[in-house]
Image: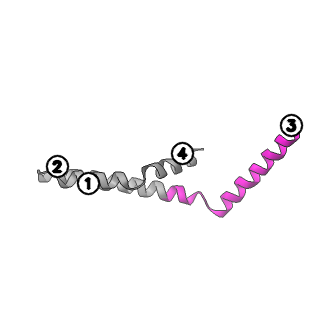
Amino acid sequence: MKLRFVTSLVLLLGTAPAAAIEQNCRFIQARAEREACYKKQEAELAAMRKAKQQAAAWRTPDTVQQMRRDDAEVYRSMHGICRGC
């Protein structure tokens, strides 16, 4: 459940916010503030990359096969309970 949330979050964020952050940092006049903005942007991009890697890591073939086995078991139990629903 948690992994699906992370995956959907990554898909929703995409790369567009990163471009918007970068454009905002370029126009800051004060050097210290601009560098702070770039550091913040770098941290946010690293967090997004990490979330993407974690989302991709859980989708190994073994995990997918286990999910399919679990789904098949649930479908069998539902078929036994509710015929013709």
Q: Marks 4/1: CA distance? A: 27 Å
Residue at numbered disc 3: 81
Amino acid under label 1?
A: Lys
Tell me if label 3 and label 2 are in contact, CB under 8 Å.
Answer: no
Tell me if label 4 and label 2 are in contact, CB under 8 Å.
Answer: no
Secondary element at tag 4: helix
Residue at numbered disc 1: 39
The mark nearer the N terminus, 2 or 1, is 2
Q: Position of residue 22 (x, y in %)?
A: 26, 55
Q: Position of residue 38 (x, y in %)?
A: 24, 55
The mark nearer the N terminus, 4 or 3, is 4
* The stretch drawn in magenta includes residue 59: yes
- The stretch of residues the image draws in magenta is 53-80
Amino acid under label 3?
A: Ile
Secondary element at tag 1: helix
Q: Marks 3/2: CA distance? A: 63 Å
Between 64 and 18, the residue placed more toward the observer is 18
Residue lying at 75% horizontally and 50% vertically, measured from the top left: 70
Between 62 and 25, the residue placed more toward the observer is 25
Residue at numbered disc 2: 33
Residue at numbered disc 4: 5
Amino acid under label 2?
A: Glu
Amino acid under label 4?
A: Phe
Q: Marks 2/1: CA distance? A: 10 Å
Q: Position of residue 44 (x, y in %)?
A: 35, 52
